[in-house]
Amino acid sequence: MSLDLAALSEAIGRRGPLIRVVVAAAQGSAPREPGAAMLVHADAFEGTIGGGALEFEALAEARRRLAARTPDGVVHYPLGPALAQCCGGAATLGFERWDQAKLDALPDPETTPLYARPLGAISEIPLAMRSLRKAARSGKGAAFLFQPGEPPWLAEPLTPALTPLWVWGAGHVGRAVTRVFEGLPFAVTWIDDAPSRFPEPLSPHVRALPAPDMAATVALAPGDAAHLVMTYSHAMDLEIVHAILARGTFARLGVIGSASKAARFRGRLAALGHGPETVARMDCPIGLAGPEGLKGGKAPAEIAVSVAADHLRWRASRGSALRTGEGAE
């Protein structure tokens, strides 16, 4: 678990100051593991620490703290008869107030990947926290750690940057794909040439980009973006793919379609001047391949789940390769 800076920033930008509730410690049978968190506003919340009576009590406590500007701190909850829960364990929850000023004061995740702080009055950093922070800065990994005391201390890894994902086309499959990527470590940009195709309201995790000339819009994509091309037109798909390959700077390129569509596209891309190595960077069909694949699943939701699972696996393997210095496509 980690501190998701992108989600925190987006939530503060929309609704202002909030209370972040995090499971600092869990003993026995508890609804969620340490590090699980939710963001609580006066009239809404995002995320979950497991639902049920514990979450109900946590929401009430967070809103009391938000209204009264109560100092940060922790509350211990036995999960038994007092909460009418049969878990039999216990959970310690941290309550922190966040606003834009506090967010702006955070260390740079690239240089300080672990955020250690007291949940209460300022005090000297404990030895265990100091050691953990030193290890994180030297590249040995950042880990979640809660240390009880007066005040208690909490350390959380800062979430790495989200992977840019550009989804081309707002049809049935495009809608299913953007839905399934909610909560995943991707920054989704959704492009279509007709603004009316985007659903209303648009999910907060998606940025819509209406573009009358979608192929020309390729130039706006970050060089490390993954692309999923799935418009209403094979001809338009080909234009976009041609533009992405011609530009050359992208992390991944997937095109919806069958094996026969893939063969036609490869032939046409070759005729447009793309060499075999360049054309080979296009994945078509998209989604999980091999024995893990959804054999023949053509429903939008099935395609979306397969694509999301494939991209999570790709992102994880890419990160591993980058950490070992091998590089990855």
Image (cartoon, rainbow, N blue to C red):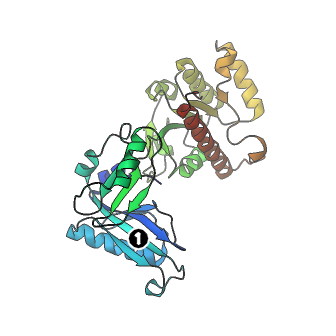
Residue 70 in which image quadrant: bottom left
The residue beneath circle 1 is: 92
- What residue is shown at x 72% (from left), y 47% (from top)? 298
205 lies above or below 268: below
2 lies above or below 245: below
* Residue 186 in the image, given as x and y percentages of width and height: 50, 43
Name the side, left or right, on which 260 lies relative to 40: right
Residue 144 in which image quadrant: bottom left
- What residue is shown at x 28% (from left), y 67% (from top)? 150
* Residue 236 in the image, given as x and y percentages of width and height: 59, 29
Q: For residue 218, say whether it is visible.
A: yes
- What residue is shown at x 57% (from left), y 26% (from top)? 240
Residue 58 in which image quadrant: bottom left
- What residue is shown at x 55% (from left), y 37% (from top)? 319
Question: In the depicted view, which residue is nearer to us: 278 or 179?
Answer: 278
* Residue 294 in the image, given as x and y percentages of width and height: 74, 48
Q: For residue 296, say whether it is visible.
A: no
Q: Secondary structure at mark 1?
A: strand
Query: Outermost residue toward the bottom?
Result: 81
Quarter of the picture containing the C terminus is: top right
Question: In the depicted view, which residue is nearer to us: 120 or 182?
Answer: 120
Q: Look at label 1 and name its amino acid.
A: Thr
250 lies above or below 33: above
Question: In the depicted view, which residue is nearer to us: 278 or 317?
Answer: 317
* Residue 62 in the image, given as x and y percentages of width and height: 32, 69
20 lies above or below 300: below
Crowd rating for badge 1 (residues with CA inside 10 Å; few <14, some 14–19, many 20+):
some
Name the side, left or right, on which 100 lies relative to 84: left
